[in-house]
Image: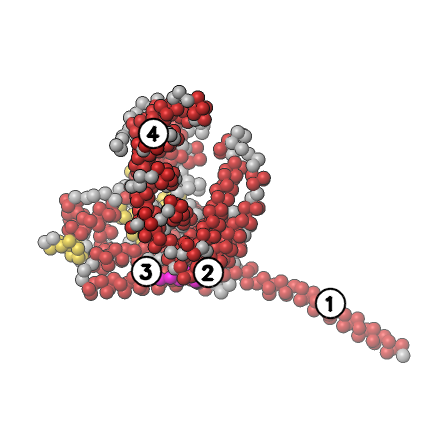
Amino acid sequence: MQMQIKKKVSFGSELLVWVGVIVIIGLGVYPYLSNYKTADHHLDYLNHDYGKNLMASAEAGSVYMTEGGDNQVFSSLYFIYAARLRPDLSAYDQMGNVFKKIYGLMLYTDPRALSRRKDLVDSNIFAGLEPFYVQISNINDPRVNLDPYFIPYWQGRRPVYLTWQRPEVWKLGDYTYRRYGIMYKVEPIAHRLLDDLSLRGSVTLSEAQYLFSEWLRRPVERGYVLEQVKYLSSQGYVKLEGDRIIFVTNTPSPLAEYFSRYRLRWQQIPNLPYLDRMTREIAIGYDMQMGDIYRERIRNLQTMYDRETRPEVRQKIATEISNAWNETKKVYREAFRYGYDSVSILGALAAFVENEVGEDLSEEAWPHFRRLLRYYVESRTLFGIAMTYNQLLLRTLYRSLERKNSLLSYLDENLRHIRRMLVLRAEAKLKEAPPRDLGGYLNPAYQSYQEYLQWKQYADMLEGVIKDMRSSFYDDIEQKGKDLVKNPKGYSLEQKQMILIQLIQRTQLAPYAPYARLAGEIMDVLALETDFQILLFAWQIAMQVPEWYTKALVIGEKILRHEAFVQQPIPEVAYNLGILAYQNQNILQAKEYMRRFKSLCEGNLQLQARFAQQLRVADVVLSQAGEGTSSQ
C-alpha cells in the first residue's frame, strides 16, 4: 500500500514538472513567434543598399548633392568618408548639417539673404565653381552674412548630380535635369529638346523657340535657338533641314544599365510591411520617386500630344502615357502596402483622387486616409493629413454631387477628429504666452496659440460649409451662380450674398478653379451695381481675397464717389484702400487715400478718437519718401 502511494506521488510530481516545462517553453516561444515578423531583420539591407545605389549613380569625380534626408545623408557619409567607397565625390547637403557648409552658417544667416545665397551658390556649383567663405571665430561677426567667393574646381568643370529635382532650375542658368537611375544630372537646356524629339521625331524652329521659352521662363530669340541647334548638330544628335530640326540620336548614358547594377534586395524581404517605419521609408521612397518620375513623364508626353498633329505620332504618345500611368499605379499601390502608417504616401493618395489622366481611384484612396487619421489621432500631424484629405473630398464633392451622402459622412468624421484634437490643445492651456511675454511673437507658446486659433477657425468654416451643402438651396450652387451672372436682377441682395460667400468659402477650403472663376464673374457683376449696400458688400468681400486687389480698388473708388457716401462718409473705406495700395507698393495711390481718410476725420473728435491708431498709420504712410507707382 505504501509503495502504491509513493508511485502516485511520484507520477503526480513528474506530471507537474512536465506541465511546468511546457508552460515555460510556451512563454518563451509565444513572444518569439508573435514578434518574429517585426523583429526579423536578417534580410534588411535597405539603408546599406540605398546608399550604395546612390553612389553607383554618379560618374567619377562628380559633385554629389543630397536634399538633406537622414537616409540619404548618413548612408552617403558612411560610404564616402568611412568606407572610402567613393572618395572622388564632393558631397553637399541642402541643410548644411553634415557635409561642407556651402551656404555658410545657415543658423545665423539672415533668412532673407539665405534664399538668394542658395541660388547664388548652386548656380556657381553648376557652372564648375566651388564656394569658400571668410573664416570667422564669432557668430556675431557681421561677416557671417557675407556671400562666399568662388574658385574653379581643381579637376575642372565636374558633373553635378542631385538626389532630387531642385525647384526653379531656370533661375540658376540654362540648365535642365535629366534622370539617370535614381539621381538627376544637371545638363545644358539643349538636351531637353532631345527628349522631346526622341518621341516626335522633328520640330520646327518656331516650335523649338516656344519650347525653350517655356522651359527657361523667359522669351528667347530665334538666334538663341539656332545656337542650341548648332551645338546639338556638332555632337551628331540632330540635323537641320530647312526650318525643321530632325532627331538623329540621343546623348549616351553616362553609365550603363543603372537598374541592373543596383542592389534592390528589399523586394525580397517577406516581412517588410511589418518592419519599423524608418526602414520602410526607404522602400516607400523608392516607390514614390519612381511614381514621380512616371508622372513627370506623363506631363511631358501630354504636352507633346497637345502640340502634335500627326495621327500616328499622337497614337504612339497616347500609348506611352497609358503605359506610364499603369506603372505609376503599380508603384504607388506598393507604397500603400509599405506605408500604411506613413504620411509619405499622401502624395500618392492624392494622385489616386486627382491625376494627369483623369482616372478616379478615390474609393481606393479613402480607406488609407481614414487609417492614417486613426493612427495619428492624438498627433499634430493629424492636422496636415486632415487638410489634404478634406481638400480632396471637397473637390470630389464639387465635381460629383451624386456622391454627396458618402462624401459628407467622411467630412463629418474628419471634423470630429479635428475637434477632438482641438480639445487636446485646449485654449486655456495655450493662452499662457501672450505677445507681451518674453519672446513676444517668436514665443513658441504664442505661436502654438495662434495655430490653435487658425485651426479652430478652419473647423468652424468647414462645419458651416458641410451644413450648407446638406441644404437643397446649395445643391446646384454652380448653376445658380451662372444664372446670377446672366440675370442679377432675378436675385435679392441676400441671395447674392449667400451664393458668393458660399463659393468663396468652398474655394478657401479646397481650391477649385470653376468656383473661383465663377466667384470672380459674380464680383464683376456686383461691381456694376449702383445700389450702395451691394457695392459696400462687394467691396468688403473683395478686400478679403488677395487676388481681387484690382476689383477692391475699382469698387472702393465707386463707393467713394457714391452719393450715399458723400451724405454719410465711412472713413474706413478710404483707410483700407490706402493700406491695400501700400501693401501692393502703390505708394502714390496709398497717400491719396490716406489724405482722403484724414480729411474725413478732420474736425470730428468722435471719429478722431475712434480712429486714433489708424490716423497714426496714415501719418506714417504719408511720411514715406518714395512715390512708387500709381494704377490710376
Q: How many numbered dots are placed on residues in this image?
A: 4
* Mark 4 element type: helix
Which residue occupies the extreme top position in the image? 603
- Disc assigned to residue 20: 1
Question: Residue 405's mark?
Answer: 2
Compute the Cα span from label 4 to label 2. 50 Å
Judging depth in this view, the residue of 508 and 140 nearest the camera is 508
Q: Residue at x 33, y 34 (%)?
A: 559
Q: Quadrant of the N terminus?
A: bottom right
Residue 26, above or below 184: below
Where is residue 626? Give x, y as percent.
30, 25
Task: Assess whether mark 2 and mark 3 are in contact (beta carbons under 8 angstroms).
Answer: no
Q: Nearer the viewer, mark 4 or mark 1?
A: 4
Question: Is 327 situated left or right of 436 in this image?
Answer: left
Q: Secondary structure at mark 3?
A: loop
Give the residue at mark 4: 566
Nearer-the-camera pick, 478 or 299: 478
Q: Are marks 1 and 2 in contact (CB under 8 Å)?
A: no
Tag nearer the camera, 3 or 4: 4
Task: State the residue position of label 3.
Answer: 357
Q: Where is residue 265 drawn, in percent x and y?
A: 44, 61
CA separation in Å, label 1 and label 2: 58 Å
Q: Amino acid at mark 1?
A: Gly
Q: Residue furthest right?
A: 1
Is 366 contained in the magenta span?
A: yes
Classify mark 4: residues with Cα within 10 Å, few (<14), some (14-19) or many (20+): few
Amino acid marked by disc 4: Val
525, above or below 621, in the image: below
Assign a secondary structure to mark 2: helix
- What is the C-alpha distance between the residues marked 4 and 1? 98 Å
